[in-house]
Image (tube, grey):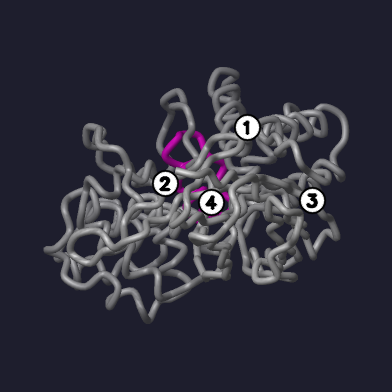
Amino acid sequence: MRALILALVLAGFGLNCAEAQPLAPTAPTQPSLPAPLPPVRALPSAADLKLAETIVFYYVRSDLASVPSVFAALKDTEAMQRTGLSRATLAGFLATLFQQNRSRVEGWIGKADDYPADGKSAIIFALWQSGNTDLVASLFHEGPDFLRDKPGNLYTLMPSRSVELDLKWGAFFASGNPGFVATLVEALDPLKPLTGNNQFDKAIRLNAAQGLVVNLRQHEVLERYIRRRAGEASGAFKKALEAVLADGMAGFKPAPDHDGDFSGTIAMLELPGKAASGGNAGEATMLTDTMPQAHRGDTVGVTLLFSGMGLKEDLSADVSYDIKVTGPDGAVDPRSAQDGVTALKDKVGGRFALIDSRSTLSIHFEPDDKPGPYRIDVLLKDNVAGKKVALTRSIELVDK
């Protein structure tokens, strides 16, 4: 049996975009974006999900090299819709990005004629919101009426409509600054006056809570901020914040093998033995049986899925593992034994995202390998939080 470590980079972020229920109509405090187009029914592709991830977690790395892909997607209405992100979220994201990188804006936008109406409207709104109104005329040769008005402050805006909620979430995704959603947190204080209309106030508080709950588990900086605010609060406000934290964490259930929040599992994949037609690699197939079977000549990939790891102040994680494979005779194959293999050493937005290991053990069964169970033992280590999880799974080599 041959075993070697193959480098794989597999992003495993879970992703739920902020979506708020429509608020009751009220006087607008920001100009309205055009009405959305009918929803696209096609399922998002891997590229669509990657695009959404680029936007929602942009602040984690602030990778300027990823920005052109956003503008390329803005030229494709259906691609942007498949991300699940509203145009208001995109406008808030772009506005903050434009404020941070004024000298790059014109180069990013490029030819105005390349954008469909909805992409163009989001960009024009973002230019106005970021104080770059002069670029609207020079790039788009348009002058919407709202350009004559002074843009509001997204940082201090108390949302009264769903579009304003999404604008603030977009600004948070671009900056990672929880101050952009501080007014949503403060809206949960039942003693804080809002609009003076009970119906409107109830809708604002409900929508604010829903957006915070949805985003809480995915964004560590947001969880830390709300926990801090809850620690400082008292009375009904404290209870409201604690309820948001409880609701946000309710959907997280660690795997059976865990050390506190830190948990993991071993995943097996049947790897293609030959290149598919055209010279491309064939598809790997997930092995879901408790003890899957393999035959001589098969190649099986072993990777790890984990979540709940600790993050440093800068959102960096450090997860590694020790691994070995024991054959039917009880002997450990020395070629399979690896210690301190890197599973993740990078920044991530939230510690509760499901992560695929950055490395995979490839096991190839040779003609002279003995039939029987081959046990894979892994010690998964969270080097930030100092936690460890022992994992075991087996695969049976059978005679044909």
Segment colored magenta: 153-173
2 vs 3, front mark? 2
Q: In the rendered image of this protein, does residue 276 appear above or below residue 204?
A: below
Which residue is at the front of the view, 400 or 191? 400
| Distance between the alpha carbons at the discs numbered 1 and 4 | 23 Å
Give the residue at x 42% y 32%.
Answer: 27
Q: Type of residue at label 3? A: Val
Q: Marks 4 and 2: CB-CB under 8 Å?
A: no
Q: Type of residue at label 4? A: Phe
The quarter in which the C terminus is drawn is top left
- Residue 364 in the image: state x and y as whole percent: 51, 61
Q: Type of residue at label 2? A: Thr
- Residue 69 in the image: state x and y as whole percent: 32, 65
Give the number of the disc on residue 285.
2
Disc 4 designates what residue?
13
- Residue 242 in the image: state x and y as whole percent: 79, 33
Q: Classify mark 1: residues with Cα within 10 Å, few (<14), some (14-19) or many (20+).
A: many
3 vs 4, front mark? 3
Disc 3 designates what residue?
389
Disc 1 designates what residue?
209
4 vs 2, front mark? 2
Q: Is residue 101 left or right of residue 179?
A: left
Q: Earlier in the sequence, mark 1 or mark 4?
A: 4
Q: Classify mark 4: residues with Cα within 10 Å, few (<14), some (14-19) or many (20+).
A: many
1 vs 3, front mark? 3
